[in-house]
Image: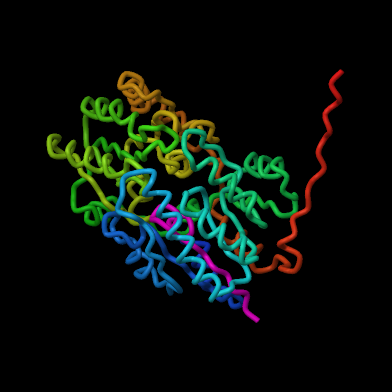
Amino acid sequence: MKRKIAVVTSSRADYSHLYWPLKDLVAHPNVDLKLIVMAAHLSPEYGGTVSEIERDGFAIASRIECLLSSDSDVGMAKTLGLAVLGLTDVLAQIRPDLMLLIADRYEMLAPASVALTLRIPIAHIEGGEVSEGAIDDAVRNALTKMAHIHFTSTQSARARVIAMGEEAWRVHRAGAPSLDHVRRSTLLSRQELEQKLALQLGARVTVVAYHPVTLLQDTTAETTALFAALKQIPGQILFCYPNADAGSHNLMQMAHAFCETHNDSHVFVNLGSITYWSLLREASLLLGNSSSGIMEAASFGLPVVNIGLRQFGRERARNVLEAHASADSILAQVEKAWNPDFRAAIGGMQNPYGDGHAAERIVSILTTVPLEGLLRKRAQPVETPAAQP
């Protein structure tokens, strides 16, 4: 009997991480893959990235329309509710042996909640990390406690998951599967990249990957500093669209308005994973608060200026420079990042998030872990504090 494994993807961000695990699951002779596509993938506002999945040759078992065209936290909450309704019918009909989820997007609470009630074991990738400035941190920890098998990116993340009370045999350090692209995918040459982007890359290219800070009441409060700094940064500026969070529409409008008044600035609604990694290889700087600056940029020796609160606490390599949400702080760190001595100093560094072999480790465990008894998680012993006098 083939093992039926459901995988849920909600956006371009998690799909780029899941690509190689999906490829290896499809190729495995003992796996019946059920790919469930939902939320931003099906939204024209975010580039209709379901088409990228289809171009990559993956069969889609189900599509869940649930993303509201909203720019508020209420819209996020309602999206979650719609996702639960849609996924309940789908997962009840598929009844997979395992379900694979990744990372920390709020939408992932929906499949995890449904799987829990339907008694479907959950495998989770990238637990144990820290990003204190976003609701992602709480989502990630919730998914960890709901999951039965864990694939962490770093050794410290594995230790953190075990410290949360998870049995050590369930927790595997696999590495970040996005880094498999660096080893296994054929990235675009500079000329091919320029053709794909329909523009000529400049001598100094700043990629801006900035998302709403979902822990703040005003999720775009830090953007005043970002755009004030961008006005003073010379060279070519390329914006990537933000995640589908409260405040994302406002961010999109600001990026488009900036490009209207600044020559050689461009906005990209959706860069496929290969195009994005190829761009990071050719860029001079990554600016913003994206996890890609923390997790993937180190593999290209790319300087990163990480802004503000969103990624606070996340493990990082020495290519990442921290900037407060002020124009002066951002510009000071940009100047440091462009210093040839800094670029030379980060050359050849090791990426703490893995070696590009994550997918094979993940698939090996998914296809061999015993299913019987997997749902029952055993409480771990704790030290009882001494009684207070």
Region in magenta = 1-18
Q: Is residue 53 placed above or below 192 in the rendered structure?
A: below
Residue in the image at 38% along x and 50% along y: 277
Name the side, left or right, on which 375 lies relative to 350: right
Residue 205 in picture, x, y percent from top left? 27, 38
> In the rendered view, how is the structure colored?
rainbow
Give the quarter of the image for residue 282.
Answer: top left
x and y percent of residue 225 in the render? 30, 25
Does 157 appear above or below 107?
A: above
- Residue for point 72% across, 63% down: 374
Residue 38 coordinates in the image, percent (x, y): 41, 62
Q: How many numbered discs sit on the rendered protein?
A: 0
Q: Is residue 111 magenta?
A: no
Question: Quick check: 350 above or below 103?
Answer: above
Q: Quadrant of the N terminus?
A: bottom right
Which one is nearer the viewer's eye here, 233 or 192? Answer: 233
The reply to whether the magenta stretch includes residue 10 is yes
Residue at point 53%, 70% (across, down): 91
Between 235 and 156, the residue placed more toward the observer is: 156
Residue 21 drawn at (x, y percent): 53, 62
Question: Which quadrant would residue 4 be assigned to in this image?
Answer: bottom right
- Where on the picture, by quarter, is residue 65? bottom left
Name the image quarter holding the C terminus: top right
